[in-house]
Amino acid sequence: MPVSKKRKKKVSTKASQFSGAKNQLKRLEKKTEEFRNENNLKLGSYDKNISEMLSEFTKDMVESSESNHETQKAIEFAIIAWNTSVVMKRQGNDSALNQVIEALKQQEAGREDALEKELRILIDRKNEMFPDEDTLIANFEISFNSNGKFSLSVASIVNS
């Protein structure tokens, strides 16, 4: 009998921990909703989510990457191109592109011409693949498994 009492107590502890997590989740959802309302943000409804679109957008870059580090750098560069494309469309001019190119010149001396060319190619690709998508990518997290495959989680800001 003492064994079953211990089991019941463990189940009870786990259930109460789960209840606490549910409460934390509710508080987080409420804070998220308040943040969205305060900042006039809305959730988009898409056939594909931004993570899926970004995965599709970067597929050839990721496939040609030889390491997890290269994969992460490729995705980071693709996000720069994605966001530059979105801002250019919103502003109706190339000022965002010019700012990114200037930053590349400062950070990547000697490679800026090649990077500018790649950036322009990716901006064109984004505009061809997802011409109506005007969501900015705010952040991302990439997790690699032992087989070298990865999952991508993206935080985005929908234009309202």
Image: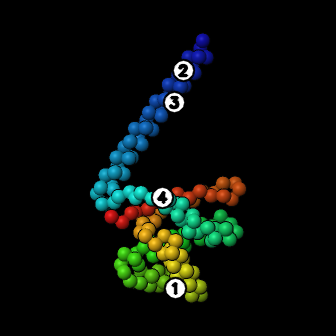
Which residue occupies 33% across, 55% down? 35
Badge 1 amino acid: Lys
Could you give the CA–CA distance between mark 1 and mark 3, rounded to whole angstroms?
55 Å
For mark 4, does the 10 Å Cα neighbourhood hold few (<14), some (14 to 19), or many (20 or more) residues? few
State the residue in front, 117 or 110. Answer: 117
Residue linked to disc 1: 105
Q: Earlier in the sequence, mark 4 or mark 2?
A: 2
Q: Earlier in the sequence, mark 1 or mark 4?
A: 4
Is residue 81 in view from this perspective?
no
Badge 3 amino acid: Lys
Q: Earlier in the sequence, mark 3 or mark 4?
A: 3
For mark 2, does the 10 Å Cα neighbourhood hold few (<14), some (14 to 19), or many (20 or more) residues? few
Q: Residue 14, which numbered label? A: 3
Task: Locate residue 150, reporting x and y percent.
Answer: 62, 58
Badge 2 amino acid: Lys
Which residue occupies 63% across, 71% down? 61
Q: Which corner quadrant of the image does residue 151 belong to?
A: bottom right
Could you give the CA–CA distance between mark 3 and mark 2, rounded to whole angstroms?
10 Å
Q: Is the image coloured rainbow, by chain, by secondary structure, or in one colour?
A: rainbow
Camera-nearest label, 1 or 4:
4
Could you give the CA–CA distance between mark 1 and mark 4, rounded to whole angstroms?
37 Å
For mark 3, does the 10 Å Cα neighbourhood hold few (<14), some (14 to 19), or many (20 or more) residues? few
Camera-nearest label, 3 or 4:
4
Q: Earlier in the sequence, mark 1 or mark 3?
A: 3
100 w.r.t. 135: above or below: below
Q: Is residue 87 left or right of residue 114?
A: left
Residue linked to disc 4: 47
Tell how many labels.
Answer: 4
